[in-house]
Amino acid sequence: MSALLERIRSVVGPAGLITAAGEAAPYTTDWRKRYVGVPLAVVKPATTAEVAQVVRACAEARVAIVPQGGNTGLCGAATPDASGSQVVLNLSRMNRVREVDAHNNTITAEAGCVLASLQKAAEEAGRLFPLSLASEGSCEIGGNLSTNAGGTAVLRYGNARDLVLGLEVVLPSGDIWDGLRGLRKDNTGYDLKQLFVGAEGTLGVITAAVLKLFPLPRSRATAVVALQDPESALELLKRTLEEGGERLTGFELFSDFCLSLVLKHFKDVAAPFARRFPHYVLMELSDTRPGNELANLAESILGAALEEKRILDAAIAQSDTQARAFWKLREFISEAQAHEGPNIKHDVSIPISAIPEFIRTTDAELARAHPGVRMVTFGHVGDGNLHYNVSAPGGVAPDAFVKETAAINRIVHDSVSQFRGSISAEHGLGQLKREEIRRYKSSLELELMRKIKGVLDPNGIMNPGKVL
Amino acid sequence: MSALLERIRSVVGPAGLITAAGEAAPYTTDWRKRYVGVPLAVVKPATTAEVAQVVRACAEARVAIVPQGGNTGLCGAATPDASGSQVVLNLSRMNRVREVDAHNNTITAEAGCVLASLQKAAEEAGRLFPLSLASEGSCEIGGNLSTNAGGTAVLRYGNARDLVLGLEVVLPSGDIWDGLRGLRKDNTGYDLKQLFVGAEGTLGVITAAVLKLFPLPRSRATAVVALQDPESALELLKRTLEEGGERLTGFELFSDFCLSLVLKHFKDVAAPFARRFPHYVLMELSDTRPGNELANLAESILGAALEEKRILDAAIAQSDTQARAFWKLREFISEAQAHEGPNIKHDVSIPISAIPEFIRTTDAELARAHPGVRMVTFGHVGDGNLHYNVSAPGGVAPDAFVKETAAINRIVHDSVSQFRGSISAEHGLGQLKREEIRRYKSSLELELMRKIKGVLDPNGIMNPGKVL
């Protein structure tokens, strides 16, 4: 065992150090099984002090560190390279909720807290921690912050960045920066925490955070709405915001092709309407007021829209069970498309007003260049985020289709760029889009990013090969 | 005229260059008349390209730049030093609203837009731009962003930082960074705009911004509530959030001494109740729903609190006129205390749960060390921000009292620090608190700030002597 690993073991103990390949396996492959790394070791510290000592040891040895949370990232940011020289620093053992302050509406948690546990701790204190995404049963808050995670509630509560008041970070030197403030207003210089949020572990290791809590909703109204086209979805979004304000906590669009995939590949789901329509919106309203007011509001908004023929049909959930069934129609799309065959995924955002035009022109361009492709278009339209996935034409062999990835990415991302959108809305860059972004971000902006990286991590030991 | 000024005049024209001392005067003194500078010139560019050329010329000549908006800052960040060598770069001529996008809920505006004009442009599009502060008729959005302005609506809508989606910035090199994105989700590397928000012009010049808009409220309920102590205010805040959620858009505490000053120094105000109470809260609820629901909610919350004796009395405004009259009781405090005599001001924030304890212990400490001082305690308790001002004992000469400033600041700021608060909640550091912050921020954090400054502005030409 090398001197570095001996030193690390003396810090974290035998339970915190994994060197056997078999034991390390769960930490060395990304969620989508796209990247497989070979680490020097997987280290699992139990305290911030241990993280600091491990980072200092690595810094002195000039050994690269790959920070890792629940390892559910979709762009390979938490996977080491294949050199056998990088240390995976997994934060999962640091999973304590340190404090809940109901008057201050804050929760202080360690990086390894699973998102669902955090949601639960908030709820037990009569509060809402609103970050919500598909992997919430496995992903950890440190990873959520490092990737600035999004999800379904962003239109109302913002991204992970918007939910954090303070951070504790181990810097690339091994120093601990205590920025664990629970303040809504603090203007005493540069807001350093912003640097570490969304940096995907390239500037330091987030070890704990003070997060905002919100009042717990006591009523919900969930509806599936049938629509002619994405324009109608925008119109409904506008109307609902104007009428209901920020009671609107979910607004998800999906096409009939998405629905058909879910109905085909899952048994325990039911079509929301007796007939089929071109597009659907899953809409959720929430309120701290209990009772039927919210359901009445949903009925009034949707009733008026039906009367004006702006929507084609609407079904409001009559029970929690039915609301959950509606959500499944949306949530199962990702898995359904995987069952259907290969598809090339894009996690993009567009100014909301441009979404219909983006879909129309990009669909047309793809159909022209790649005849027969089937568009799996769905996503968080309420915040401008589309999962704009391209599924193989029927009968095309998976391998043949996957070869088209670069060409299809080029069409989609060029179009995104023309609409002043982003080629990574909520999944980050990691290693997957590190090269791709150079085409779309100005060299000036890339240079600014490199300067920040250079000054905070001069030896380049923090997650090299990711983001930049 | 120097070669630099010749070059600048060739860029901005004669209308954009002020060198005569008399004409320059309005730009060389801060709002509180605490600092008086002597600039090399005042430059007023009309476009981003002009700003870039001016900055490049100054960079090449190694001449310092002091960015300035409406010049309403309270910490002297926009005032040049007395050397006669700094250029004041005033953005007021860049005052166009470039675009309002109602579907995307965004407005794109130039730095020189007066906040009130921006609010008006939003309202004309049926939207709310929620940033609201005392100087809104004069302050400009570029300054609001550079100081991360706060105000009365932060508990619901956040600070200026939370309201910005994209920025256009002229860097210290004179390069223009186009980060004018109107996206709610964008995770393609470090969020550079965060660096410039709240940097008080020390890292670059904000020239334009894409800002978030919100649904326009169609009903409001405003109440003044009488309370025994700050603890009761916290209890009411908690209850109101739990019941009404984020309908709560204002929650301001003030003591009876504050009310007495307003009643003494202003003619057209009326006491809210027939008798006096120790403390008051001004509470505002807003909703996109029209009608009486909101007033009923306020009545129900306050009625229950009265019955449980958690509050002492409550008056709900019966008209817009009465609501405005209630707001005056709070808004006039700043001016009323100035009429009363000298006072030493503190703009601090504290975790909300610790506010009563902070007030109690700090009041006691001040009374012990400076017998007879009168506390003018008021502020945005809903977001933890207190304006905790110390007024001279009756009969003490202004000059004698002002000499106590450092000693009184020490007591207040040390106490803030013990409660893990901030010595500048919403006013920034500028030159006023640049030295003071060194006592309260870790050397590690100050060093990180200096590193960021050094890499973005290696020649130190951006607003030297401010913040750092």
Image (cartoon, coloured by chain):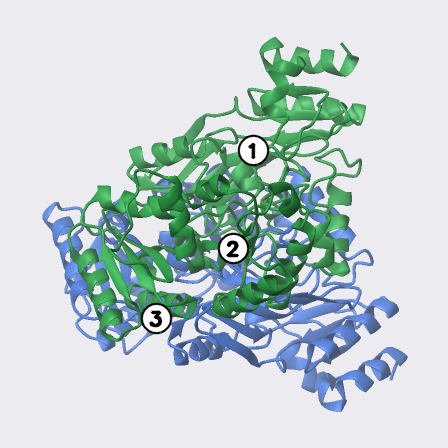
Chain colours: A blue, B green
Name above or below for residue B28 compared with residue A44: above
Give the labeled residue for mark 2: B374
Left or right placement of residue B117 versus residue B40 in this view: left
**Gap between marks 1 and 3 measured at Cα:** 42 Å
Q: Amino acid at mark 1?
A: Trp
Circle 1/circle 2 CB separation < 8 Å: no
Q: Position of residue A288 (x, y in %)?
A: 28, 67
- Of badges 1 and 3, nearer the viewer stands 1
- Of badges 3 and 2, nearer the viewer stands 2
Question: SS for tag 3?
Answer: loop
Residue at the farthest right position: A3
From this viewpoint, is residue A146 visible? no
B271 or A339, which lies in front? Answer: B271
Q: Position of residue A193 (x, y in %)?
A: 62, 58
Give the labeled residue for mark 1: B31
* Residues packed near mark 1 inside 10 Å, few (<14), some (14 to 19) or many (20 plus): some
- Are discs 3 and 2 located on one and the same chain? no
**Gap between marks 1 and 2 measured at Cα:** 25 Å
**Gap between marks 3 and 2 measured at Cα:** 40 Å
Question: SS for tag 1?
Answer: loop
At x 21% / y 52%, what residue is drawn? B289
Left or right placement of residue A389 versus residue B179 in this view: left
Give the labeled residue for mark 3: A216
Q: Position of residue A367 (x, y in %)?
A: 40, 45
At x 65% / y 45%, what residue is drawn? B400
- Of badges 1 and 2, nearer the viewer stands 2
Circle 3/circle 2 CB separation < 8 Å: no
Q: Amino acid at mark 2?
A: Arg
A63 or A457, which lies in front? Answer: A457
Q: Chain of mark 2?
A: B
Name above or below for residue B179 compared with residue B374: above
